[in-house]
Image: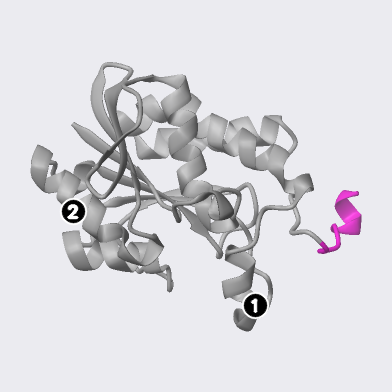
Amino acid sequence: MILLAGLGNPGAKFRNNRHNIGFMAAEAIHRRHRFSPWRQRFQGLCAEGTVGTHKALLLMPGTYMNESGRAVGEAMRFFKIELQQVVVFHDELDLPPAKLRVKTGGGNAGHNGLRSITAQCGNDYRRVRMGIGHPGDKNLVHSYVLNDFAKAEMPWVEDLCDACSDHAELLASGDDPGFQNRIHLAMDGRGWNDVKRPGEAKDPSKA
């Protein structure tokens, strides 16, 4: 079984925050594939089902971002899921908006959700890094990630989450490079190859 965990903060007021793009990806996968209804379990919302031919557990921790590892660890222990079969979808400040990278292990880059999972479960899980861009000043990061995506950003956010859903079977089968490449092609095909943060000037050479 593979564990697909989307990170975010529970509650309506956080629903469209940049920090919640991991939840949005999990919800897109739930809509696209054959999963049971969401239910309260493992200190969050979870659903069991299949992605292609692979058994999967979807999880959205309800512990708030900083304690995500409690929920992920509980689900792992119950189903005896190996760390290498844990895939975490999360927001990534160090990637431009609409970009995506997959990596296993590595640093947590100040992300408290990843830090919590590493502390509770170990470090060598798979991370789907969903780019949201950086506000340009580290003092603005907290308010930036806890603010909603702008209306103009939502089309690429939805396309990125849908692309993750469309190609999730590659993750389930362990083909992380293939998944990453398919997402790149999907987003490039939709014209999201040069997305800017709200208020950031577009490169005039690409206008």
Q: Is residue 30 above or below residue 67?
A: above
Q: For the point 58% across and 64% down, which residue is it?
A: 146
**Magenta-span inclusion, residue 203:** yes
Q: For the point 59% across and 38% down, which residue is it?
A: 160
Q: How is the rendered protein coloured? A: one colour
Q: For the point 34% across and 62% down, which residue is it?
A: 114
- For the residue marked with disc 2, what is the amino acid? Gly
Q: In the picture provided, is 32 more to the left or to the right than 2?
A: right
Marks 1/2: CA distance?
31 Å
Whether the residues at callouts 1 and 2 have beta carbons within 8 Å, the answer is no
Tell me the crowding category of disc 2: few under 14, some 14 to 19, or many 20 or more residues within 10 angstroms, Cα based: many
Q: Which is more N-terminal, label 2 or label 1?
A: 2
Q: Is residue 183 above or below residue 137?
A: above
Residue behind mark 2: 73
Residue 25 is situated, as x and y percent measured from the top left of the image, at 48, 39
Question: Can I make out residue 131 in this image?
Answer: no
Q: In the picture provided, is 139 more to the left or to the right than 10?
A: right
Residue behind mark 1: 140
- Quarter occupied by the N terminus: top left
Tell me the crowding category of disc 1: few under 14, some 14 to 19, or many 20 or more residues within 10 angstroms, Cα based: few
- Magenta highlight range: 199-207
Residue 26 is situated, as x and y percent measured from the top left of the image, at 43, 37
Q: In the picture provided, is 13 more to the left or to the right than 76?
A: right
Q: Is residue 170 above or below residue 145?
A: above
Residue 172 is situated, as x and y percent measured from the top left of the image, at 30, 30
Assign a secondary structure to mark 2.
Answer: helix
